[in-house]
Image (spheres, rainbow, N blue to C red):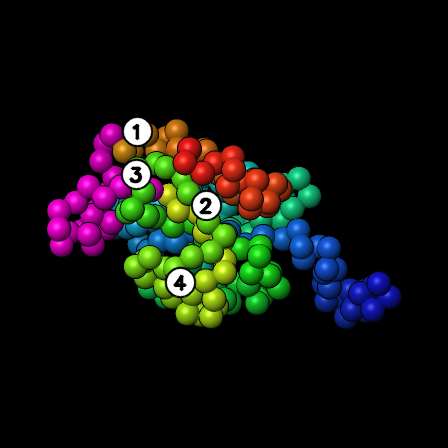
Amino acid sequence: MKFKNFFSDILGIKVETKEELMKKFLIIGLGNIGDKYTNTRHNIGFKVLDEVAEEHNVTFETEKLGDVASFRFKGRTFILLKPSTFMNLSGKAVKYWMDKENISIENILVVTDDINIDFGVIRLKAKGSAGGHNGLKDIQEKLNTQQYARFRFGVGGNYSRGRQVDFVLGEWSKEETSQLIERLPTSAKVITSFGTAGLNNTMNTFNGK
């Protein structure tokens, strides 16, 4: 504690305790930057984080490798990251902000779309393969592990053979857009539950909902 006070008071460097670091979470929403991608299925990660930020009255600031916002909730600090690297290079931003904020891999959650899950259905997992998702693939490569939590938001698979890219980069239908109004607040609750109740409890509460 004396060393902590020395660096904080004399050098002006903020030194966080182990307990403080354990209560800090990095939430990454995957997507592509640019107006043309804003309402596409592939950008659900951005949309979920926008909902969280709005509910907690914080705004995103453009910083290195992404737009970032943070807030405190029930004694936890949540750092929201929307990478600006484009989907296929998401891992670069994730690694940078994990190192910058000294956040352990157990305290990160990646929010992404999933074509293998029905629209609007939530599925959290503690680990797993990239499943063909380029954003998850790059995170796995940069972190050199599959052992990180991910929040998969189902976008469905209503596309013809060979049209997967067009589908995920396509905009939500009118029906989907209206249903998102309900699904996004639920998704925001997943984020805060992950930090306050833990991954297992959050999975038990929200998976399949």
- Residue at 60% across / 61% down in the picture? 104
Residue 92, picture quadrant: bottom left
Numbered badge on residue 118: 3
User: As drawn, is 169 to the left or to the right of 25?
Assistant: left
Q: CA distance from mark 1 to mark 2?
A: 23 Å
Mark toward the start of the polypeptide (1 vs 2): 2
What type is the residue that disc 2 sits on? Leu
Q: Is residue 123 above or below residue 24?
A: above
* Element on which disc 2 rests: strand
* Element on which disc 4 rests: helix
The N terminus, quarter of image? bottom right
Mark toward the start of the polypeptide (1 vs 3): 3
Mark toward the start of the polypeptide (4 vs 3): 4
Q: Main secondary structure of the magenta part?
A: loop
Q: Position of residue 207 (x, y in %)?
A: 45, 38
Residue under label 1: 178
**Circle 4 or circle 3, nearest the eye:** 3
* Element on which disc 3 rests: loop
Q: Residue furthest left?
A: 161
The C terminus, quarter of image? top left
